[in-house]
Amino acid sequence: MTLAEAEELYKFCCGNEGYYMWHEAGAKAVEEYTALKISKEQKGKWDRDIIEQYLSAMKTSPEHSANWFDHVLGALARGNCEVVGYAKKLLDAMEEMDDLDELSKIDIIRSMGEDSQFHVSGCQFFCLKTPYMYRMEQVMERFVDFEVKDEKADPRFERSPSKLKLYRDAVDLYKKAFAKWSRHSE
């Protein structure tokens, strides 16, 4: 595997090197990738590319912003590149997400309150790794303030929870995460 091929794999997997990379590319590719012993600095360059790509995509394809948000948060949480400037840009992008559908907003709120397999919660990241805890709190106060219809999240499935339940659960996760991590940032 060449460094260019490793970069392509890294970016394809949005920097998720473990199981996700193995799942997408197979054990042989992961072995070759690992054998390259890629430096944190190199991964930082690739993470900056990922962040720039998805911050831009949030503006051009807002219907996928929840996915793009997770990719940016994951790249920032890895800590391979400078995070403060990009954290500010992510908050700026969140302030412009007025036209998102309910489920996309709920997904982002959940990402702010809950660790995923790819990154720590957005709340933990902003509280512990940036000087933007108070700005994040202000952005999130406005972000969670929308009316949610009490209808099934996915009407194709009988057991689909209601959007209202998903919203309440996501907001609850965020509030609990904020209560926990804001104490640690002082």
Image (spheres, rainbow, N blue to C red):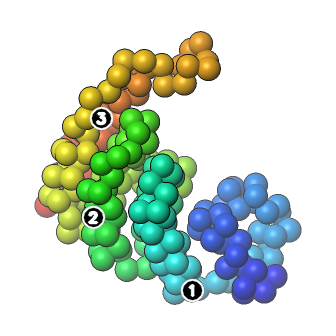
Q: CA distance from mark 3 to mark 1?
A: 36 Å
Q: Which of the pair 167/10 is nearer the observer?
A: 167
Amino acid tagged 1: Gln
* Residue 114 visible at all: no
User: Which one is in front in this view, the residue at disc 1 or the one at disc 2?
Assistant: 2
Q: Which of the pair 98/160 is nearer the observer?
A: 98
Q: CA distance from mark 3 to mark 2?
A: 20 Å
Amino acid tagged 2: Asp
Q: Name the residue at 56% across, 79% down.
A: 46
Query: x, y percentage for residue 64?
Result: 50, 51
Looking at this view, name the residue that lies furthest to the top.
158
Q: Name the residue at 79% across, 63% down.
A: 25
Q: CA distance from mark 1 to mark 2?
A: 26 Å
Q: Which residue is mark 1?
A: 42
Circles 3 and 1 in contact, beta carbons < 8 Å: no
Q: Which residue is mark 2?
A: 92
Q: Which residue is mark 3?
A: 171
User: Against 8, is 185 above or below?
Assistant: above
User: Against 162, is 173 above or below?
Assistant: below
Q: Would you say 23 lies left or right of 153 here? A: right
Query: x, y percentage for residue 175?
Result: 24, 39
* Residue 6 visible at all: yes
How busy is the neighbourhood of tag 1: few (under 14 within 10 Å), some, or many (20 plus)? some
User: Which one is in front in this view, the residue at disc 3 or the one at disc 1?
Assistant: 3
How busy is the neighbourhood of tag 3: few (under 14 within 10 Å), some, or many (20 plus)? some
Question: Which dot marks residue 87?
Answer: none
